[in-house]
Image (spheres, grey):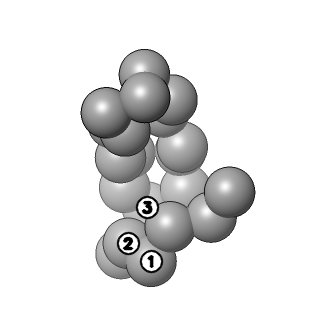
Amino acid sequence: MWWAVPPTRTTQLPSGGAHSY
């Protein structure tokens, strides 16, 4: 899944999934 977050940023999801842009 891809979340609408600013690029070059790491988002820590509540589900424990980290998406690195």
x, y percent for residue 18: 48, 33
Per the model, the C-alpha gap separating discs 1 and 2 is: 4 Å
**Tags 1 and 2 touching, CB below 8 Å:** yes
Number of residues whose C-alpha sits closer than 10 Å to that of mark 3, classed few (under 14), some (14–19) or many (20 or more): few
Q: Which residue carries the number 1 mark?
A: 4
Q: In this rendered view, identify the residue nearer to me: 17 or 8.
A: 17
Per the model, the C-alpha gap separating discs 3 and 1 is: 12 Å
x, y percent for residue 4: 44, 77
Circle 3 sits in a helix, a strand or a loop, which is it?
Answer: loop
As shown in the figure, which amino acid type bears the numbered disc 2? Val
Circle 2 sits in a helix, a strand or a loop, which is it?
Answer: loop
Q: In this rendered view, identify the residue nearer to me: 14 or 11.
A: 14
Residue 15 vs 2, above or below: the answer is above
x, y percent for residue 1: 68, 57
Q: Which residue carries the number 2 mark?
A: 5
On-image quarter of the C terminus: bottom right
Left of 6 or right of it: where is 17?
Answer: right
**Tags 3 and 1 touching, CB below 8 Å:** no
Give the residue drawn at x 51%, y 29%.
17
Circle 1 sits in a helix, a strand or a loop, which is it?
Answer: loop
| Residue 8 figure quarter | bottom left
As shown in the figure, which amino acid type bears the numbered disc 3? Thr
Q: Which mark is residue 20?
A: none
Q: Which residue carries the number 3 mark?
A: 8
